[in-house]
Image (cartoon, rainbow, N blue to C red):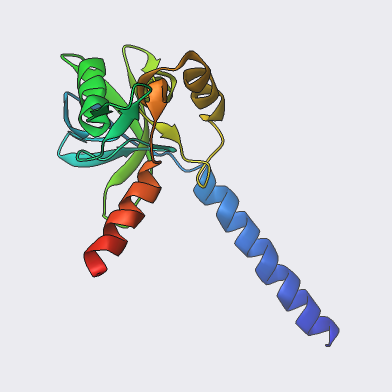
């Protein structure tokens, strides 16, 4: 490898690094307004579908099991929790990504409360460790306090979706 090739290679890596830094600090899109809840981790806001960043709530049709063995519709309960949290107030979201379903992924606040954190802390959503560790402490707190889905046993939403997908292929 010649000196010229090495310099070209270093310049390319330097430019790529600079591009990552610039993109990271570009102003992110802000959306505000009244939200219409879809499920426990997504809603319509200002003409966009927003998915809460770093968390995953039980699916609408998903059930969980109480300690006494009774099943309950934890997916519907998660949606109801989010609906109560966002009811009749302005929601503000910083959009940080777009997912494969073309939903806007964001960190959101309502009444100066971090909605993403609140859903996990209430026990109606789980921290998505594959994305961020930001909500792991909130999940630990909800689990210890036996809030929401932690009142008994549950299948993580990502596993529940995978199992349903596999069953439908049979």
Q: In which quarter of the image is residue 36?
A: top left
Viewer-proximal residue among 145 and 110: 145
Q: Quadrant of residue 165?
A: bottom left
Left or right of 20 in this view: 150 = left
**What residue sits 62% from the left and 55% below the top?**
18
Q: Is residue 11 above or below residue 118?
A: below
Viewer-proximal residue among 84 and 149: 149
**What residue sits 30% from the left and 40% below the top?**
51
**x, y (%) of residue 149?**
37, 26
Viewer-proximal residue among 143 and 118: 143
Viewer-proximal residue among 49 and 20: 49
**x, y (%) of residue 154?**
38, 35
The residue positioned farthest toward the front in the image shown? 68
Q: Can residue 121 be seen in this view?
A: yes
Q: Can residue 90 be seen in this view?
A: no
**What residue sits 44% from the left and 38% below the top?**
54
How many numbered circles does the render carry?
0
Q: In this view, does 156 lie above or below 71?
A: below
**x, y (%) of residue 118?**
39, 20
Q: In this view, does 169 lie above or below 82?
A: below
Q: In this view, does 98 lie above or below 83?
A: below
Quadrant including the N terminus: bottom right
**x, y (%) of residue 144?**
53, 18
Quadrant including the C terminus: bottom left
**What residue sits 14% from the left and 39% below the top?**
47
Q: In which quarter of the image is residue 146?
A: top left
């Amino acid at each position: 490898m010649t000196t010229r090739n090495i310099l070209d290679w270093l310049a390319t890596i330097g430019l790529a690094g600079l591009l990552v830094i610039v993109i990271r600090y570009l102003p992110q899109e802000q959306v505000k307004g009244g939200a219409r809840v879809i499920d426990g981790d997504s809603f319509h806001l200002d003409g966009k579908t927003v998915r809460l960043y770093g968390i995953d709530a039980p699916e609408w049709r998903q059930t969980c099991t109480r300690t006494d063995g009774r099943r309950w519709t934890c997916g519907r309960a998660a949606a109801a929790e989010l609906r109560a949290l966002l009811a009749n107030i302005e929601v503000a979201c910083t959009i940080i990504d777009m997912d494969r379903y073309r939903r806007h992924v964001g960190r959101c606040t309502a009444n100066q409360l971090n909605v993403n954190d609140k859903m996990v802390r209430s026990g109606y959503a789980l921290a998505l460790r594959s994305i961020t560790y930001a909500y792991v402490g909130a999940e630990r707190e909800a689990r210890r306090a036996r809030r929401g889905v932690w009142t008994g046993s549950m299948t993580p939403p990502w596993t529940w979706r995978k199992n349903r997908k596999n069953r439908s292929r049979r």
